[in-house]
Amino acid sequence: MTDHPFRFGAVAGQAPDADAWAGLARRAESRGYSTLLVPDTTGTLSPFVAAAVAATVTTTLRVGTFVVAAPYRTPEAVAWETATLHRLTGGRFELGLGAGRPGAEQDAAALGVPFGTPGERIERLSRTMDAVKDVRIMVAASGTRLLRLAARRADTVALGVPPQYTEDQVAAKLDELYELAGDRFHELELSMNLVAAGAEPPAWLVERLGPVGAESTGVLTGTAGEMAETLRRRRDRLGISYVSVNAEYLDEFAPVVERLAGT
């Protein structure tokens, strides 16, 4: 059980133009989402620029990165961008950090920066956390070394597990985090991402992952009431209170946000 109230984020990285992006940010705000989160890939919008635009056209929506890949920028560059957004958004910016998702080597090569070994990337992430001031920091983590860093220093831990993970598998990962965090565990906000939400899994996801079972924690199905009850149960069992969702499902998932946000 956790004392953290529910909050919800929408994850988006594409828009055909500024009007469409602004409209998405306003929709997320009007439907009760806490944050609009932007991935950090060369195939999506620049996360810092997109976050700034979203904040400009909203008043309460928080904006963040999902997540900045440590190898792509120096710690000092991330701290500069973060301080600017913290100031110009009136404190509505949250920094998400990671060591680089699978396949990020290609993005690093496209950007002309070394990707580094896992140890080097985690060390750079740690130095980035040292450089950044005055904002909430979310660390995306799955392996032991990243979980250890997140346990010691993050405000939010986003579990970077495959969407087909069951609750038992997530619980095992959280047991590891609990051992690493010790007394700090209950201070941590725990987060997971939904790649899809709605009445049934979309065809593209079934094609990609195979049959998606009801126990798959990265895919939430059912009516709004059923989905809300599943998330309540998961919070009671796992402590997960911050749920992000692919913005493709922003409107479909909004009734769940309305039921649970802030509770």
Image (spheres, rainbow, N blue to C red):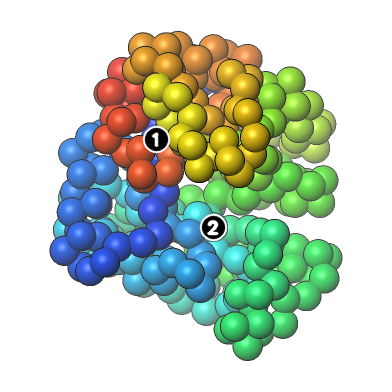
**Camera-side residue of 65 and 91:** 65
Q: Which residue is at 75% across, 27% downward?
A: 169
Quarter of the picture containing the C terminus is top left
Q: Which residue is at 33% across, 66% downward?
A: 50
Q: Residue 227's image quarter? A: top left
**Which residue is disc 1 drawn over?**
8
**Camera-side residue of 257 and 213:** 213
Give the CA separation, mark 1 to mark 2: 16 Å
**Which residue is disc 2 drawn over?**
67
Q: Is residue 98 left or right of residue 48?
A: right
Question: Which residue is outermost to the bottom?
Answer: 112
Label 2 sits on a secondary structure element that is: loop
Q: Amino acid at mark 2?
A: Val
Q: Position of residue 200 (x, y in %)?
A: 45, 24
Q: Which residue is at 48% across, 50% downward?
A: 136
Q: Is residue 246 left or right of residue 216?
A: left
Is residue 10 in view? yes
